[in-house]
Amino acid sequence: MRGTKKPTLNVDMSKSKSKSKSNYRISNWSEYDASLKQRGSLTFWLTLEVIEQWVNQEKTGRRGASNTYNDVATLINGLPK
């Protein structure tokens, strides 16, 4: 048993066929571009209460311009576009 070599497995990878990823060809570029833009859109549904309170009517009692928008409007406008 001493001095015998262990059998090895030799595989030539150049002869084996690998499966390649199939290519997807775009035929309608305007439709494809529109779908990419739509993919990132986000729609907000606002209740009538939020719409009525969108503009701040309260006076701050300080000098200068008052706050134009309420906290909800400021929060929504601060979301990433």
Image (cartoon, helix red, strand yellow):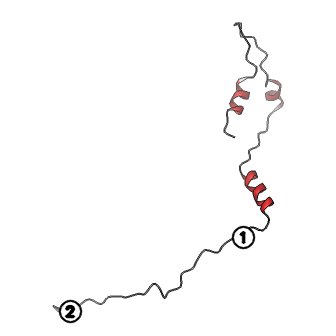
- From this view, report whether residue 71 is shown above or below residue 61: below
Looking at the image, which is closer to me, 18 or 14?
Answer: 14
The residue under the point 57% across, 79% down is: 19
**Quarter the C terminus occupies:** top right
The image position of residue 40, as x and y in percent, is: 71, 49
Q: Which mark is residue 25?
A: 1
**Label 2 secondary element:** loop
Q: Which mark is residue 12?
A: none
For residue 44, which quarter of the picture? top right
The amino acid pointed to by label 1 is Arg
**Label 1 secondary element:** loop
The image position of residue 33, as x and y in percent, is: 76, 57
Q: Is residue 47 left or right of residue 3?
A: right
The amino acid pointed to by label 2 is Thr
Near mark 2 (Cα within 10 A), the count class, few <14, some 14-19 or many ≥20, is few
**Residue, far left:** 2
Near mark 1 (Cα within 10 A), the count class, few <14, some 14-19 or many ≥20, is few
**Quarter the N terminus occupies:** bottom left
- Cα–Cα gap, marks 1 and 2: 56 Å
Q: Are marks 1 and 2 in contact (CB under 8 Å)?
A: no
- From this view, report whether residue 63 is shown above or below residue 77: above
For residue 63, which quarter of the picture? top right
Marks 1 and 2: which is nearer the front? 1
Residue linked to disc 2: 4
The image position of residue 14, as x and y in percent, is: 47, 85
- From this view, report whether residue 62 is shown above or below residue 43: above
